[in-house]
Amino acid sequence: MRSIAPWARVYILCAALAGAACAAPALTSRTPWGAVVLLAALYAGCEQISRCRVIGRRAGAPPNGLGTFFPVLLAAVFLLPPAAAALVAVPGALLARVERRPRGVRRVWRAAQLALAAWASAWVHGALGGRDAVAAPDFPYALAPAGAAVLAFAAVLTVLDGGILATAERVPVRAAWRGLFLRSFAPVAVHGLAGLMMAVLWRSPYGPLAALLVLLPMGVSCWVFAQYHRERAAHQATIRALVQAVDIKDRYTRGHSERVGRASVMIARELGMADERVESLRFAGILHDVGKLGVPTRLLRKDGPLTPQERRVIELHPEYGHEMVRGIGFLGEARAAILHHHERIDGSGYPYGLVGRQIPEFARVVAVADAFDAMTSTRSYRRGRPVEAALAELSRCAGAQFDPDMVAALQRALERHGWHPAVTSDTAGVPVPRQGASGVPTGPGAGAR
């Protein structure tokens, strides 16, 4: 949106005019200005938290606090007439922190979007008698209009978000709204409960001050959630840095690690692993060759067969890799896979010659994914094998080199999702390496290396 398309400008202008039209009646009707000003100030203040160095940057608050404080907006929806609820969102949205340009247009767009969502949500809530139920409070009955209001809020956000994707980001119309509603509804539903609690306490004898206490646990939970995403982003950055270092050093297998991670995830899902283990296994696949950073570059890039002594040096890379990631706690079981992914079921692998189930499960998965990608990926020095041929080779070696259960899981996953290998090196003129007994290349860039 740096250079906004004409249709996007028209779309944003129409949304802004519609938002202004929705909020305008509040200026001429009997509006509870005390509540409007207090809620608007509270929402605007919450927006500014993301600008605070201590709370925002160091504590890991999201750069855009709009979603964090939906409880305040939804409390306004449950307490105020539609036009007044639309006004509550405007100051905070206009003052919110915006990272990308054009900042002014983005602020106007967000203000219009939230004003329209709040207006529609408050109208639905009022039409179903929700404000009377909150004031009573007839709490079980109050849940029905509140739920309808939450649905309306999420639906308006979805419609408007899809429109801006289609006009400003030029996303195809068929795909613009795909999956948007569920992504909008989940946080709005959770925050809607907090907003309803605020509204009920606001109307209670305890008054607005008691309602503000609802924001304390909500704020703590949002902070914890932001910390989790901040830590996860740091993990991803660490993984990317290590993989890029391996790809730079071993140009023959560029992209191989990412594909091994993807194939490992496919196997893990077929085996029914929990999401936490699937993520750890993805890390194992991506980092399985990180030990190559400890191997001399001349060996990794050597044209032609390796001598026995050179191969022994290459075979140290699982131990190098394990030593490198030993202190990275979030990898969990992935560290064992990095160490043992070249073990064989018959005990003839390395570095320790483990047999059968002595080999960690993650290592048995990565071994199959590694060999499969080594056979199917097209590189500058050879063409990849067809998927069917690679699976036939894996099946032939199952029980000796590979775990049959892992091979079968990969085959089932590929039948469902397919596989699309890609060229992983830009280097030309490298001779085609000879093939080992398992069909996996043993020359430069082979999976065994």
Image: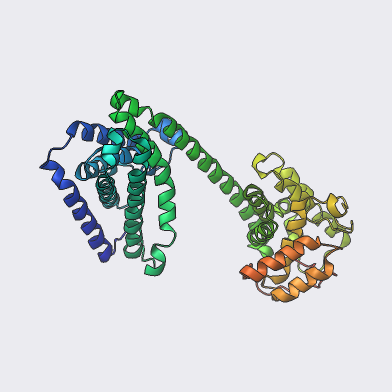
What quarter of the picture does the N terminus occupy?
A: bottom left
Answer above or below: position of 386 versus 204. Answer: below
What quarter of the picture does the C terminus occupy?
A: bottom right
Outermost residue toward the left in this view = 28
**Residue 342 seen by the camera:** yes
Q: Residue 288 or 30: which is nearer the viewer?
A: 30
Give the x, y percent position of residue 147: 37, 46
Instruction: Give the residue drawn at x 65%, y 61%.
Output: 266
Instruction: Give the residue drawn at x 35%, y 37%.
Output: 196
Give the x, y percent position of residue 270: 68, 60
The image shows a total of numbered marks equal to: 0
Q: Residue 395 or 321: which is nearer the viewer?
A: 395
Q: Quadrant of residue 177?
A: bottom left
Is residue 191 toward the left or the right of residue 268 in the image? Answer: left
Q: Residue 343 or 246: which is nearer the viewer?
A: 343
Outermost residue toward the top in this view = 206
Is residue 155 toward the left or the right of residue 231 in the image? Answer: left
Is residue 82 toward the left or the right of residue 169 in the image? Answer: left
Answer above or below: position of 422 versus 248. Answer: below
Instruction: Give the residue drawn at x 72%, y 57%.
Output: 297
Is residue 78 toward the left or the right of residue 289 in the image? Answer: left
Give the x, y percent position of residue 424: 63, 67
